[in-house]
Image (cartoon, rainbow, N blue to C red):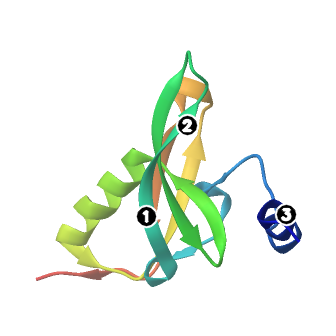
Amino acid sequence: MDELTKFLEENELTTTLKNIAELDSVQLDLIKNITLEEMGNEENRFKKYVCEYNEEKYTIPTGVLIAIKNLKQKMTFTRIRVLKSGEGLKTTYQVVPLDPINKV
């Protein structure tokens, strides 16, 4: 069996990535392998952060990562909910800690 056939049999192929906001909650210690990946076509190239969560790939918007970083300076938490509103360039995200403990 050639390498391509073996790969196709062993891997589920997907054409789209899920957004982390599609999850009901996110356990932060389960986020693995965060990478900045280049996407799009030749005329419209862009980069997105991609991670693995429960063995699936998700995009993590830059604004979500910045919000998590800022919140971690104020409190300790292990789970979040990412709320998404709007579409396209008008999309906004809000990160809600589900188990916050304020830092003193």
Foreground of the two, 34 or 4: 4
Task: Tell me if residue 66 can be seen.
Answer: yes
**Residue at 73% of width from left, 47% of height from top?**
16
| Location of residue 26 with respect to 101 vertically, above or below | above
Whole-percent x, y for residue 70 in the image: 23, 59
Foreground of the two, 15 or 2: 2
Instruction: Give the labeled residue for mark 2.
Output: 39
Element type where label 2 sits in the image: strand
- Please tell me how crowded label 2 is: few (under 14), some (14-19), or many (20+) other residues with Cα within 10 Å: few
Element type where label 3 sits in the image: helix
| Location of residue 40 with respect to 63 vertically, above or below | above
For the residue marked with disc 1, what is the amino acid?
Answer: Ile
User: Label 1 to label 2, Cα distance in Å?
Assistant: 15 Å
- Please tell me how crowded label 3 is: few (under 14), some (14-19), or many (20+) other residues with Cα within 10 Å: few
| Location of residue 87 with respect to 35 vertically, above or below | above
**Residue at 33% of width from left, 62% of height from top?**
68
Q: Would residue 74 appear left or right of 9 to someone viewing this image?
A: left
Instruction: Give the labeled residue for mark 1.
Output: 34
For the residue marked with disc 2, what is the amino acid?
Answer: Met
Which of disc 2 and disc 3 is earlier in sequence? 3
Q: Would residue 31 appear left or right of 41 to someone viewing this image?
A: left
Foreground of the two, 65 or 43: 43
Instruction: Give the labeled residue for mark 3.
Output: 8
**Residue at 46% of width from left, 70% of height from top?**
33
Query: Which quadrant of the structure image shows residue 24?
Result: bottom right
